[in-house]
């Protein structure tokens, strides 16, 4: 049985693909090129900014990263964030059922604070893991392993919601089960990365408090331990 649910942020809690793409494409245009779709998948979505700069912007030296980070923060803090359909309801259902939840993001803590503040989720997550909490970002599994440790849960008792290939890889490599949020044209990629199920959003995902079952559509269900069972399992 599962004990905890771990959520990525960008593309899972909030819809940020357009704003993230536009920021990095605008920076690329200032450097005289455009980022190809494959490179967006491999080096932007789900990755920390330092990874993106190293891989796609070799002409920008590390001593110039601070200015890019300043512009990125200014951009991200100016946005109004929109929740992915159904996620706020699911988070409320998990809270009512006392299922531990964590936010595990490659974003900086200031962005997480902005997003959570706008969506009134500042007190929702039991654990928050951001970019500076781990030395290596996704697809390395460190962030999910740390989240499970801080929740006092075994990583293979955790269910992860991710959207990016790097994030799915991170979760599965850590040992968690992963549900991916992806459009149909990306479904094969996230399944190849290890996602067990693919959905568009959270509209058909719910938590049944009587059966302690997280339902994904009509076919898939993830059984969860009750709060009492979770304490017993950890003790034994």
Image: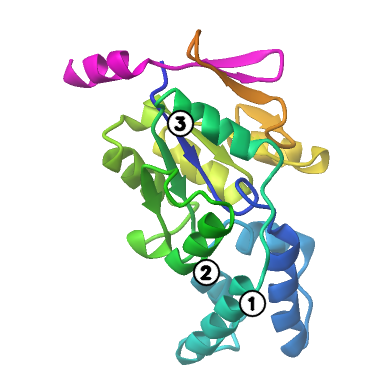
**Magenta segment:** 213-236
Quarter location, residue 147: top left
Q: Can residue 72 be seen in this view?
A: yes
**Would you say 147 lies left or right of 84 here?**
left
Q: Residue furthest top?
A: 211
Q: Position of residue 64 (x, y in %)?
A: 51, 91
Mark 3 vs mark 1: give the one in front.
3
Q: Is residue 51 above or below residue 81?
A: below
Identify the secondary structure beneath mark 1: helix
- Who is closer to the viewer here, 232 or 33? 232
Looking at the image, which residue is at 69% across and 54% down?
Answer: 82
Residue designated by label 1: 75
Quarter location, residue 189: top right
- First along the sequence among labels 3 and 2: 2
Q: How crowded is mark 3: few (under 14 residues within 10 Å), some or many (20 or more)?
A: some
Residue designated by label 2: 51
Q: Where is residue 142 in the image (x, y as percent from the top left)?
A: 37, 50
Q: Is residue 178 visible?
A: no
Q: How crowded is mark 1: few (under 14 residues within 10 Å), some or many (20 or more)?
A: few
Residue designated by label 3: 95
Real-space Cα separation, disc 3 to disc 2, in angstroms: 34 Å
Real-space Cα separation, disc 3 to disc 1, in angstroms: 32 Å
Mark 2 vs mark 1: give the one in front.
1
Q: Where is residue 1 in the image (x, y as percent from the top left)?
A: 41, 15
Real-space Cα separation, disc 2 to disc 1, in angstroms: 19 Å
Q: Where is residue 219 in the image (x, y as percent from the top left)?
A: 69, 13
- First along the sequence among labels 2 and 1: 2
Identify the secondary structure beneath mark 2: helix
């Amino acid at each position: 049985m599962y004990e905890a649910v771990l959520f990525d942020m960008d593309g899972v809690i909030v819809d940020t693909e357009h704003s993230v793409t536009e920021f990095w494409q605008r920076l690329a245009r200032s450097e005289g090129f455009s980022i190809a779709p494959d490179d967006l998948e491999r080096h932007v979505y789900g990755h920390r900014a330092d990874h993106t700069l190293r891989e796609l912007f070799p002409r920008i030296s590390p001593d110039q990263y601070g200015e890019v980070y300043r512009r990125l923060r200014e951009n991200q803090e100016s946005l109004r964030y929109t929740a992915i359909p159904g996620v706020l309801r699911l988070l409320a259902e998990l809270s009512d059922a006392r299922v531990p939840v964590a936010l595990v993001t490659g974003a900086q803590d200031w962005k997480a604070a902005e997003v959570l503040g706008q969506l009134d989720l500042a007190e929702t997550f039991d654990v928050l893991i951001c970019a500076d909490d781990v030395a290596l970002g996704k697809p390395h599994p460190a962030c999910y392993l740390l989240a499970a440790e801080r929740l006092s849960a075994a990583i293979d008792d955790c269910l992860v919601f991710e959207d990016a290939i790097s994030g799915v890889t991170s979760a599965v490599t850590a040992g968690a089960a992963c549900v991916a949020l992806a459009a149909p044209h990306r479904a094969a990629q996230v399944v190849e990365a290890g996602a067990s199920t693919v959905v568009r959003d959270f509209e058909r995902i719910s938590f049944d408090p009587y059966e302690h079952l997280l339902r994904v559509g009509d076919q898939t269900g993830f059984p969860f331990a009750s709060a009492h069972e979770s304490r017993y399992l950890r003790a034994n």
